[in-house]
């Protein structure tokens, strides 16, 4: 009888161990399923996101790739969000193609209101810059990497030249200049003498860049 009792106890212990093992395996399987069900984090991208708009409507110059919200009071069908195309134009219902680049939001409001008078009595138009994608400057001429660069932080002419790979061997470093276009379309030329600036002479020439400035390195 003792050996039968011992055999029963051994069998009971094995069954208990098997039950515990089964419970552990089931818990692990549930945990793995829960982990697999979680959505993967979004992949990183090298493409910069548009800069959130915090601009003065009376001074910011609208540029290509910016996104504008056009509101027409009591005219929901004519109110919409539109991107500024690379050619500087936007498309609106009824009005059609309108040039937006080069204007401030306040100026564009007047342009759109004048165009809408054919369809709306006394149109009240508001233009808001939703997203800024035109924050960039251009550097051309005798530098290592000429082209357009993002202007998402404060940057001087010296910073820009360094970002573009510095001067080439035959660059005329005393005759660099910055071209800046005002809201009325006039262009200002500002000299930059590299050799004088790095010596501390005429440091005011090392100006802070603005969107759409062009640095010319002869």
Image: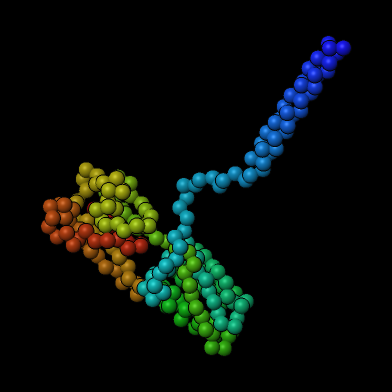
| Number of residue marks | 0
- The residue nearer to you, when weighing 11 against 140, is 11
Whether residue 143 is visible to the viewer of this picture, yes or no, is no
**Residue 48 image offset from top left, x and y in percent:** 45, 52
- The residue nearer to you, when weighing 136 against 16, is 16
Within the image, what quadrant is residue 174 found in? Answer: bottom left
The residue at the point 70 percent across, 35 percent down is 27
**Residue 162 image offset from top left, x and y in percent:** 27, 48
Q: For this view, does 176 lie left or right of residue 62?
A: left
* Above/below status of 89 relative to 14: below
- The residue nearer to you, when weighing 92 against 152, is 152
Residue farthest to the front?
2
* Above/below status of 128 relative to 66: below
The residue at the point 50 percent across, 78 percent down is 126
**Residue 208 image offset from top left, x and y in percent:** 27, 61
The residue at the point 68 percent across, 33 percent down is 28
Residue farthest to the bottom?
121
Q: For this view, does 121 lie left or right of residue 184?
A: right
Within the image, what quadrant is residue 20 found in? Answer: top right
Residue farthest to the right?
1
């Amino acid at each position: 009888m003792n050996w039968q009792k011992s055999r029963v106890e051994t069998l009971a212990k094995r069954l208990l161990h098997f039950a515990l093992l089964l419970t552990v395996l089931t818990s692990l399987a549930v945990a793995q399923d829960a982990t697999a069900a979680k959505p993967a984090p979004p992949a990183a991208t090298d493409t910069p996101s548009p800069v959130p708009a915090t601009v003065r409507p009376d001074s910011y110059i609208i540029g290509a790739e910016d996104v504008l919200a056009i509101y027409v009071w009591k005219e929901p069908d004519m109110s919409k969000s539109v991107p500024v195309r690379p050619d500087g134009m936007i498309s609106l219902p009824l009005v059609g193609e309108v040039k937006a680049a080069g204007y401030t939001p306040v100026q564009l409001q007047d342009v759109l209101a004048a165009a809408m008078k054919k369809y709306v009595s006394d149109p009240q138009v508001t233009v808001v810059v939703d997203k800024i994608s035109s924050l960039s400057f251009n550097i051309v001429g005798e530098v290592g990497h000429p082209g357009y660069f993002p202007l998402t932080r404060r940057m001087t002419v010296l910073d820009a030249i360094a970002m573009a790979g510095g001067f080439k061997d035959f660059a005329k470093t005393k005759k660099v200049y910055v071209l800046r276009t005002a809201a009325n379309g006039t262009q200002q030329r500002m000299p930059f003498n590299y050799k004088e600036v790095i010596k501390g002479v005429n440091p005011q020439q090392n100006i802070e860049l603005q969107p759409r400035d062009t640095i010319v390195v002869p």
